[in-house]
Image: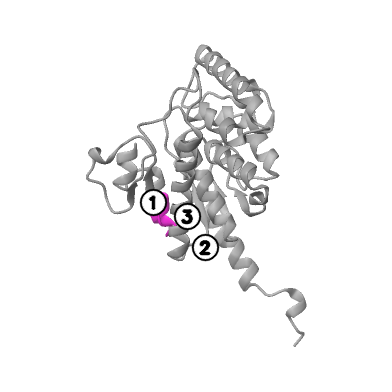
Amino acid sequence: MVRLIADGRAVSSALARAHGCRLRLVDVGSIGAADGPWPDHVRIARVGDGTASLAHGPAMSVEAFDAALAIGEAEAESALAGGARLILTGEMGIGNTTAAAALISLLTGVSAEAATGRGAGADDSMLRHKTEIVGRAVARAGPLLARDPRAAMAAVAGFEIVATAGATLAATRHGTPVLLDGLVSTAGALIADRLDPGVRQRLIASHRSAEPGHAPALTALGLEPILEWGMRLGEGSGALVALPLLDSAAALLGEVAMLTEVTSP
């Protein structure tokens, strides 16, 4: 899937081209430089070979958390320096709806059952197992949240989720809005909002995912989604679909006269 995005043949690639949006693919800890060569829009900035299993202990150290956060911040800073006026966050990760559900449960207080969905198609048995894993991981991380929130979030997060949090932090720090994709991007936004509660003022929710944890995450951030299409693909696809609606809104606000401005002949 990563190779398809890099080669411009994925859903996100097609939508980015259609809407004139620059796409940047960043490897935060999976594919590795050895799997190249990669096109110029791909950056290898790996924190490690991947996180540990949150089913058995902390997914990453606080140092790894900060490293992933810095990668996302650097990407947003680079995009803004290049003239970007809006940042869209998306992700490609395997098993990351589990990490996202754990983060949402940890940071919003909803139950593991309310936060956990079927992801890429879990059957009933797998969903029960997934929910149990999320519940146990949150039970371990929860006591840390008040005294060491970074350690608590690091215990259940993924490198790509933390990197989207870093990009969100950097963009909003400059007053630039961030258009969120679905469940996983919103989990990253929850991290960013925990680190800097002012972040939510610059967030826009593109859609509400079919994953059950997305609704309480959006509610916690005070966001109403633009679209209600039950999407769950990831890759930033929902944000890219919503992007033309933001362009339409900007055109109406910036170019259409108010009736009070019109004088009678």
Q: State the count of labels.
A: 3
Residue under label 1, please give it: 24
**Where is residue 140 drawn, in percent x and y?**
60, 20
Quadrant of the drawing holding the C terminus:
bottom right
Give the structural element (helix, strand or loop) at label 1.
loop
Identified by mark 3, the residue type is: Ala
- Foreground mark, 1 or 3, reads 3
**Secondary structure beneath disc 2?**
loop
Q: Give the alpha-carbon distance from disc 2 to disc 3, as whole Å.
A: 11 Å
Q: Which residue is mark 2?
A: 85
Residue 106 lies, with reference to residue 164, above or below; the image says above
Distance, label 2 to label 1, CA atoms, is 15 Å
Q: Which residue is mark 3?
A: 76
Can the viewer see residue 177 in this picture? no
Q: Tell me which segment is drawn in magenta.
A: 15-24
Rendering quarter of residue 135? top right
Q: Position of residue 100 (x, y in %)?
A: 54, 31
Q: Are marks 2 and 3 in contact (CB under 8 Å)?
A: no
Q: Earlier in the sequence, mark 2 or mark 1?
A: 1
In magenta stretch: residue 19: yes
